[in-house]
Amino acid sequence: MSALVAIIAMFSVSALGLLALLVYWLRQRAQQAPKPRKAKKPRRSKTADSTADALPEPEADADAAPLKQTRSRLISASSLAEAEAANALPDPDYPEIEPEPAEPELPAPITAAARQAIVLHQHFPPHRAPQTRSWFGGTPVLPGAADWPTNPATGKPLHFLLQLDLAEVPPEAGLGLLPPEGALAVFLDLDWGAGEVFCVLHAAGYAGTPWRALDVPPALAMAYGDEAALVWPWVLTPEHGTQVLPRWPFAPRLIALPEAEAPEAEVRDWPHRIETVRALLDAQGAEPLAPALDIPDFHGADGQGFEPLWYGYPQDWISVQIACAALVREADRAARTVQNDPYPGLDEAERAAQIKTVREEAQAWFDHALANPALAPLGPPVRKAFWDWLSTHRTLAERVMPEAVEAAIETTLHASAEEAAKLPEDVIARVAYRHALAIGTPEGVIAPPPPRLLAPASGTSDLAATHLLLLELPDNPALGHHFGGGALQWWITPDDLANRRFDAVVMTRAG
């Protein structure tokens, strides 16, 4: 009975608690203000003139509870005043951002010269060249009363490099700036190698102006001075050098170059591309060239003997001189080092004695050749005696014969048209590659930058943005151009070229 009473008591307490909570909730509900109904937006009625009737604003109920505040879509009056005040202030002093400078446009002639080249293609063989007044080396023949230029510091004559008959240049190649008449002649101080003193001479000539040869000045130094023995194949001491470089005629040929891959505003250098190679091959004729001479060419038909390249070798005394000078140099090299030893079976004393014998005998033949006219032809007995002696020193001799015979053929070609005409065709062909614009090999075509005018330069130069490349001459041993393994470049501005101011030309070197 007591348990039942306890359960009833607990139920009663819980009911009273729930009732109290309900009464408290109702009282709180009654104290809250009723939410105002959202007024319906009155419908706008349009009159005939499409104007809307003005609606009266509803009066505010003073006893009503304040409305719930919401974010206004309009700026408040105070905020508007602040914004107007800020607008009245001066602009902050931000640093001005300068626009990037635009790439300067190159002058039209410089842009045009980047797409072409006047290449100087050598006639081969030279004694069959057509009548021309353009050539490397030799002595100048110029129109008018031109004088041989001198070094202003020393008064010594400069060395003659080349002349170009401007009438032979295709008119469109001159860019409207190169003189269409007369000749350009280039002189350089070669007393101590490729010097810095030069002269670019424009000998003006018109129709009927006589051209005259300039005599070699007696005071002209030997080309390359004390370095002559390292340059000329027939020289052992500087005094046996030469004042003039080999004379080799050429023809100016205009070729088109491929379009630049870089933006036009960028200055280009010489384009080493397949299109350039094809243009050079077209300029010289794509007929295949004979390979250079090699040691097996002197082994005879059986491949075992040691025979001259053709029956008529050596053809003159300078050919003997060239072969003996090469043999002396090779003997000196063998005495300095045992690398690639020609006498591996001999002891040190025997080896030294053999080298000494070769050198002394080669020097004796050299001296004998030097005492005779250089281009005097040799009879069969002399040729046989020389080759019989050379064969006794075959071990060293066959090492030098390819280059020695090549130099002998080349010397005869440019020095004596009469003797050159006696050389066999297949013999002449073996040196043609040394005078080509492009050379085909089993691995591909070799086409180094050629001698040229009004064209892209080799390498990069700050002058390329303001100057035209008037002329570039690369190293070429066949022409006696030894410029330290690189090229010499002569530059002129378009304005100076148009006004014939060749005294404003500047020279640079390209590696």
Image: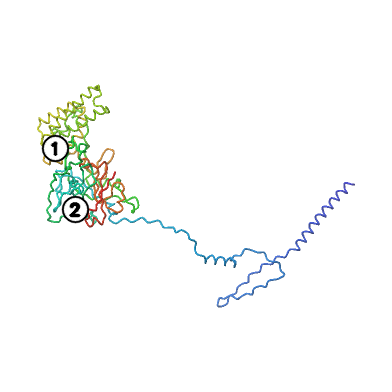
**Residue 158 coordinates in the image, percent (x, y):** 19, 46
Question: Does residue 95 appear to the left or right of 79 in the view shown?
Answer: left
Q: Amino acid at mark 1?
A: Leu
Q: How many marks?
A: 2
Q: Which residue is mark 2?
A: 202
The Cα–Cα distance between marks 2 and 1, rounded to whole angstroms, is 37 Å
Q: Earlier in the sequence, mark 2 or mark 1?
A: 2
Q: Amino acid at mark 2?
A: His
Q: Which residue is mark 1?
A: 423
Residue 317 disc label? none
- Outermost residue, front side: 154
Could you tell me which secondary element the residue under label 2 belongs to?
strand
- Residue at the image position 38 percent from the left and 56 percent from the top: 101
- Outermost residue, bottom side: 48
Among the 4 quarters of the image, the one containing residue 432: top left
* Residue 281 shows in the view: no
* Vertical arrangement, residue 323 with respect to residue 453, above or below: above
